């Protein structure tokens, strides 16, 4: 099993370069960072995890800036988005940002994507929440075209461009892995169509993650997709929880790292490393 962390990198917690270094020193495989471009003053959308939105949501660094900083400070650490709100981003610009990061990191990028929950936030970007899942699909498919073709074009309902040149191309071939986040009834359909893996949150519950991991394996075999790995986001540092996820066939655990100053971050990561180490011994 692979072990990484999922966190919100903000101006009030450990700096991303320092975080990357301490993760690599402790043997972690990956760093996944969340993003929000902004939080509207008036939010009516229900945050999936409770009533009061935590302070860290308001203060996230741009994910590609944070991940570039972490990548430059490390040699082996995978750097990923968890999740990238592609429904709020231009696909051509984002394809270039991801390919550029894959270049400067020597092929260490993982792209976690999702449709998002904050309807007010996405509306500020001109996105209709009712069609965000279809929009997400087209933007991912368009980015894949850009990454894999010298003359890329895409013609869809939401994304439409004639042939373009766009370099650099990613180091990883055919492109960095795309992990599809989500827990809705059609999430696995999206994983099978355009994903390279599934990234549910631990809040879905170990029983449901176990059931759906088995379903994904079965369906992927039936359609000839081969094995599609599962990475679980925001897992508590509990050995019994990790053991259950391992039994379910989960391949990557992303511990839920709080956004705190450097010294406290190191103490928390030491505890995470002890739990992870018990599965490596």
Image (cartoon, helix red, strand yellow):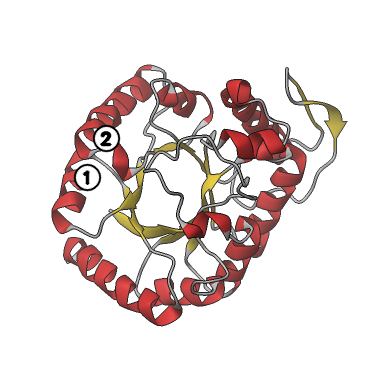
Task: Point out the residue furthest to the bottom here.
Answer: 263
Which residue is found at the position 79% from the left and 48% from the top?
Answer: 167
Q: Quadrant of residue 203?
A: top left
Q: Secondary structure at mark 1?
A: helix
Q: Quadrant of the C terminus?
A: bottom left
Which residue is found at the position 36% from the left and 42% from the top?
Answer: 201
Nearer to us in this view, 258 or 78: 258
x%, y% of residue 60?
Answer: 57, 59
**What crowding class fits label 2: few (fewer than 14 Cα within 10 Å), some (14-19), or many (20 or more)?**
many
Is residue 219 something that shows in the picture?
yes
* 109 in relation to 280, above or below: above
Q: Quadrant of residue 146?
A: top right
**What crowding class fits label 1: few (fewer than 14 Cα within 10 Å), some (14-19), or many (20 or more)?**
many
The residue carrying mark 1 is 245
Q: CA distance from mark 1 to mark 2?
A: 8 Å
Q: Is residue 128 left or right of residue 160?
A: left
The residue carrying mark 2 is 209
x%, y% of residue 259?
Answer: 44, 66
Is residue 87 something that shows in the picture?
no
Task: Point out the residue furthest to the left here.
Answer: 240
Name which of mark 1 and mark 2 comes first in the sequence: 2
x%, y% of residue 8?
Answer: 49, 59
* 270 in relation to 122, above or below: below
Which residue is found at the position 37% from the left and 43% from the top?
Answer: 49
Q: Is residue 86 left or right of residue 164?
A: left
């Amino acid at each position: 099993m692979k072990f990484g962390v999922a966190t919100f990198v903000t101006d009030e917690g450990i700096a991303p370069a320092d975080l990357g270094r301490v993760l690599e020193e402790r043997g972690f495989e990956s760093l996944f960072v969340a993003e929000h471009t902004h939080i509207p003053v008036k939010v009516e959308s229900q945050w999936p995890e409770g009533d009061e939105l935590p302070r860290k949501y308001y203060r996230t660094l741009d994910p590609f800036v944070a991940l570039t900083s972490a990548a430059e400070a490390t040699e082996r650490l995978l750097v990923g988005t968890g999740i990238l709100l592609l429904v709020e981003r231009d696909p051509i610009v984002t394809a270039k940002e991801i390919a550029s990061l894959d270049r400067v990191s020597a092929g260490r990028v993982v792209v976690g994507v999702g449709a998002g929950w904050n309807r007010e936030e996405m509306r500020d970007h001109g996105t209709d929440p009712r069609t965000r899942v279809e929009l997400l699909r087209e933007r991912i498919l368009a980015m894949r075209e850009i990454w894999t073709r010298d003359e890329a074009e895409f013609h869809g309902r939401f994304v439409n461009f004639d042939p373009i040149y766009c370099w650099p191309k990613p180091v990883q071939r055919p492109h960095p892995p795309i992990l599809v986040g989500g827990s809705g009834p059609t999430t696995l359909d999206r994983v099978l169509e355009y994903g390279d893996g599934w990234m549910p949150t631990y809040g879905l519950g170990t029983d449901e993650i176990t059931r759906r991991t088995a379903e994904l394996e079965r369906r992927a075999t039936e359609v000839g997709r081969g094995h599609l790995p599962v990475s679980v986001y925001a897992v508590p540092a509990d050995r019994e929880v990790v053991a259950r996820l391992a039994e379910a066939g989960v391949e990557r655990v992303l511990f839920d790292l709080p956004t705190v100053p450097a010294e406290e971050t190191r103490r928390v990561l030491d505890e995470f490393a002890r739990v992870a180490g018990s599965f490596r011994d």
